[in-house]
Amino acid sequence: MYSIKTISIVLSFSLLGCCTTCRNQPQSLLGSLKNSEYRDRMNATAWNSDNPTLDNYYAYKDQQVKQIIEQLGKGEEPPIWMIEETLDNSEANRWGG
């Protein structure tokens, strides 16, 4: 049926008070986090010669996403503001992204 880890993630999202869409599809948040982690990791190496500051920004965002995924994997409940901040890459504009 469902593993304990899946139930833990579903319960975590419910307790976090995510939007209705997230409660109906709890895996969508985890999917968004994993997609964000991949994009940030790829972007962290895309600007080496042109804009190393932007590389550092994306490397930092990649670490933030990994931390949230690890917390969810341990059954911890990171605050919703932390998840939203982690998924927000709007500061990249400030560094030329």
Image: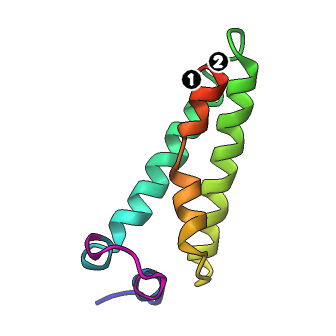
Is 58 positioned to the left or the right of 31 in the image?
right
State which quadrant residue 51 falls in: top right
Check disc 1 and report the residue beneath it.
Answer: 97
Q: Which mark is residue 18?
A: none
Name which residue lies at 61% across and 65% down.
Answer: 82
Q: Is residue 10 left or right of residue 33?
A: left
Residue, x 62% and y 80% (percent of image)? 74
Crowding at dot 2, Cα within 10 Å, few <14 / some 14-19 / many 20+, comes out as some
Picture layout, residue 12 above or below residue 60:
below
Q: As displayed, is residue 23 above or below residue 21? A: below
Residue 69 placement (x, y as % from top left): 57, 65
Magenta range: 14-21
Q: Is residue 16 magenta?
A: yes
Residue at the image position 48 percent from the left and 54 percent from the top:
34
**Residue ID at (35%, 69%):** 27
Q: 9 or 58: which is nearer to us? A: 58
Disc 1 and disc 2 in contact, CB within 8 angstroms: yes
Q: Amino acid at mark 1?
A: Gly
Which structural element holds mark 2? loop
- On whether residue 52 falls in the magenta region, the answer is no
Residue under circle 2?
47
